[in-house]
Amino acid sequence: MFDYKNLADPLEEETPPLKLAMLVRANQIVREICEASPTLDDKKIEVGLCSGTDIRKATHKAILEASSLRREHLITKFQALGYDYKNLQFKYHDLRACSVKFTNPNADKSLPKIIICAHHDYISGQGASDDASGLAVMLELARIFKDTNLNIEFISFDLEEIGLSGSEDYFENLPEEERSSTDQVIIAECLGSPNDLILCESIAGRESDPEMIERFKQIAIDLKIPLSAMHCLGFSNDQATFADNGIPGVSFTGINLETSPSYRHDGGRAEEHAGIPVHTDNDIASTITGENMVYVILLIEEYIRRYKSLPSPKSPPPSL
């Protein structure tokens, strides 16, 4: 298992005011997202999802109403950065659900497309780590790259928590031209806890892209970011849907390696077994620590700069 947890912390090096500003901004984004939608009762949702038809439908409706408010907040934030958006509506049974896609009007569509994903639905507490933290990563990267012509697309899926329904619908309705132009996907998931930062070598039996894995490992070494790479067997996310449709990708998440060295859950709830405060009422903004969000922002920013033809901000511009 690749493990650089003992490397120096980049948040304490070279430009601490810049990194501190990013840390404060990421935590603030999470708080604002959580304030835009209601708190959900973990036990009521859990019981409701396992109940008879009428109660289960009411539970799905409550989840969708909360995710709709979160999506509207996200749209406002991306619009303020100058991005265009498209709602991706779909039906879940007879209820309306809606993912959302954000694109930069300056993007050069002839360039290979990289998609950065998170999800705006949640099923417990304020959904702070799962997955307002991923949305915060998306928003900060959108801010960083808004003045470029890179073909970066940001997608927030609905009903990730309910069978990856949003990403499943996305591919059911995706034109072949868009599918073939998609180069890679990066998923940001459950990054609000102080757990170990994990680069998933596989998700639910689907292998991550080996070249992307090796590149991110090298960037972690270069930036001295504490990162472990491992196979994540105890949970799934939207990367699985992309993999099933032939799109290479990777996922970042947070896992407590002391309590779950292989992230194989033993019949209990995987999130509790791994020490992640998600799918519980404790998944609220006040429990969030932003270090892993900042690490992932820095990793993805450097990855895109290195491999998508942008100079690093610390490097001299290329000669004309």
Image (cartoon, helix red, strand yellow):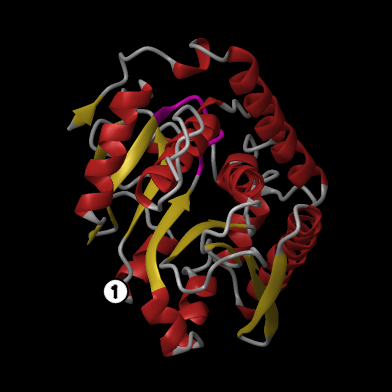
- Occupied quadrant, residue 5: top left
Q: Position of residue 54 (x, y in %)?
A: 69, 78
Quarter containing the N terminus: top left
- Residue placed at 54% from the left, 72% from the top? 166
Q: Nearer the viewer, residue 230 or 256?
A: 230
- Residue placed at 51% from the left, 32% from the top? 313
What residue sits right under mark 1 in the picture? 246
What is the three-letter code of the residue carrying label 1?
Answer: Gly
| Left or right, 112 with reference to 12 | left
Task: Estimate how packed mark 1 is, as few (under 14), some (14 to 19) or many (20 or more) residues with alpha carbons within 10 Å.
Answer: some
| Left or right, 232 with reference to 145 | left
Q: Nearer the viewer, residue 179 or 283?
A: 179
- Occupied quadrant, residue 241: bottom left
Q: Is residue 195 magenta?
A: yes
- Residue placed at 41% from the left, 80% from the top? 179
Q: Which residues are magenta?
A: 190-196
Residue 63 vs 291, above or below: the answer is below
Residue 184 vs 77, above or below: the answer is below
Q: Is residue 46 magenta?
A: no
Residue 18 vs 205, above or below: the answer is above
